[in-house]
Image: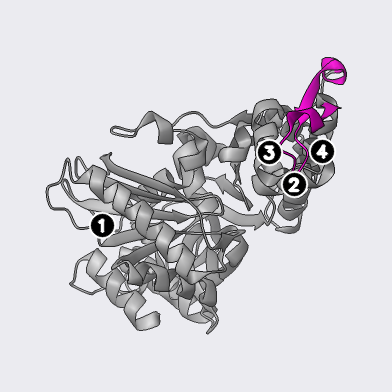
Amino acid sequence: MSFKQPLRAGSVIATLDVGSSKIACFIAQMTDDEGGFKIVGVGHQASQGVKSGVIIDINLAEIAIAQSVHAAEKMASKTIKGYPLRDVVLAVPSTSSDSHFMDAHVQMMRQTVTENDVRRALAKAQMKAQKDDREMVHTIPVDYILDGHRGIQNPYGMSGQLMDIDIHMVDADYSHLKHISQCTERNHLDIVSLCSSPYAAGLSTLVEDEIDLGAIVIDMGAGVTSYAVFQSGRMLYAGGVPIGGQHITSDIAHGLTASIADAERLKTLYGSALATISDEHEYIDVPMMGEQNSKADQQITRSLLINIIQARLEETFEMVRQGLTDSGVDAARCRRVVLTGGASLMPGVQDLAQRILSKQVRCAQSLKVQGLPDATSGPAFAVSMGLITYYTERPYEMPMEIASYGDSRSIPQRFKSWFKENW
């Protein structure tokens, strides 16, 4: 595809990831016209008013977003004097979105396929798929059929009379997006693009060969575990289950009659996805809830703690496996899985995922991007980084860009107009 790049050298864009455990804002400045960028501002704040990726208290969420954005602006002001943050790319949680396929066909206006022909087909599919209670997030061309010939990856310049396109559509719950939009508007921010969270995670953690040959990314967050299937350079499916690291913490608190804070500490210090023989003989102290005297601590074997963790992780991976099976996408051809997200850092997760999913599994590496602080270079911030990549490299998958074809305004201006008209 060849739609124009939305940003040029020196341009600035920000991303906003409103998660269950944290709200993160990244500010990036383009270093060239080819999509290269450096991070000039980072802000993250403990999440408030959000549960399983969904806003449950607008006022608390607004405050947390404001704190995260302010921290990123303060850092960016050292590089960009007087920079006021305005435009943001927003991550959409998988639990609020749906992934499905459509097809569209168009007659060629000329003997060869042009960009206009592709856009007409994509716009036609969007109009057909649009629903009052849903907002379009992605319109991704997956396969082109030209005069009955399938498997065409890039139809531009090819000759034909009739073109069909298989299209992967992702839409999201309107009410959820409206709530986030209210929070951003109160912070004087304009949403210029949407991106599914697992899609962004995949763009920042998968290598090029994995995206082309086929891979599944699983983003293990605090309240949601999202997944996306990639093949032939495209995302073929995205889904998620409302289970994450916070549910493990809750299980530990209930199982050991401990406070949430102590359960989180035990998970961090002694947690693992798989137990070993030595764990049967290692004892750890668990503070009794409400007790101030350490003499009242109970002692348990580390294996008991790990068994609680393992049970929840097994359930999570089994639900992901079932979701992939039910998707209708041939995920079996993707023999590789990449784990990312904060919960993927737990020891033994890779081996457990490999056992349940029956695939090759690797954990995402640290993000290597100019200007990115070490503290925010881990898998927990993969979505924030992927949002920048999506906005700079894949504007042709953005529904508002497709619908606004022929508009002479800049892409950010058209995006703002789109959201104001629809929200």
**Extent of the magenta region:** 277-300
Q: Amino acid at mark 4?
A: Ile
* Label 1, label 2: how far apart the Cα atoms are: 40 Å
In the rendered structure, which disc, 1 or 2, sits on the residue that comes first in sequence?
1
Q: Amino acid at mark 2?
A: Thr
Which numbered mark, 4 or 3, is in the foreground of this view?
Answer: 3
Q: Are marks 4 and 3 in contact (CB under 8 Å)?
A: no
* Label 4, label 2: how far apart the Cα atoms are: 13 Å
Q: Quadrant of the N terminus?
A: bottom left
* Label 4, label 3: how far apart the Cα atoms are: 15 Å
Q: Position of residue 311 (x, y in %)?
A: 82, 40
Q: Are marks 1 and 4 in contact (CB under 8 Å)?
A: no
* Magenta region includes residue 290: yes
State which quadrant residue 279 falls in: top right
State which quadrant residue 40 falls in: top left
Q: Left of 189 or right of it: where is 290?
A: right
Residue receiving disc 4: 308
Q: Which mark is drawn over residue 262?
A: 3
Residue in view at x 49 percent, y 37 percent = 205
Residue receiving disc 1: 4
Q: Residue furthest front?
A: 293
In the rendered structure, which disc, 3 or 2, sits on the residue that comes first in sequence?
3
Total marks drawn? 4
Q: Amino acid at mark 3?
A: Asp
Badge 4: how crowded within 10 Å, few (<14), some, or many (20+)?
many
Q: Residue 170, relative to residue 106: is it above or below? A: above
Q: Amino acid at mark 1?
A: Lys
Q: Residue 85, relative to residue 35: is it above or below? A: below
Which numbered mark, 1 or 4, is in the foreground of this view?
Answer: 4
Residue in view at x 71 percent, y 52 percent = 324
Q: Which mark is drawn over residue 316?
A: 2
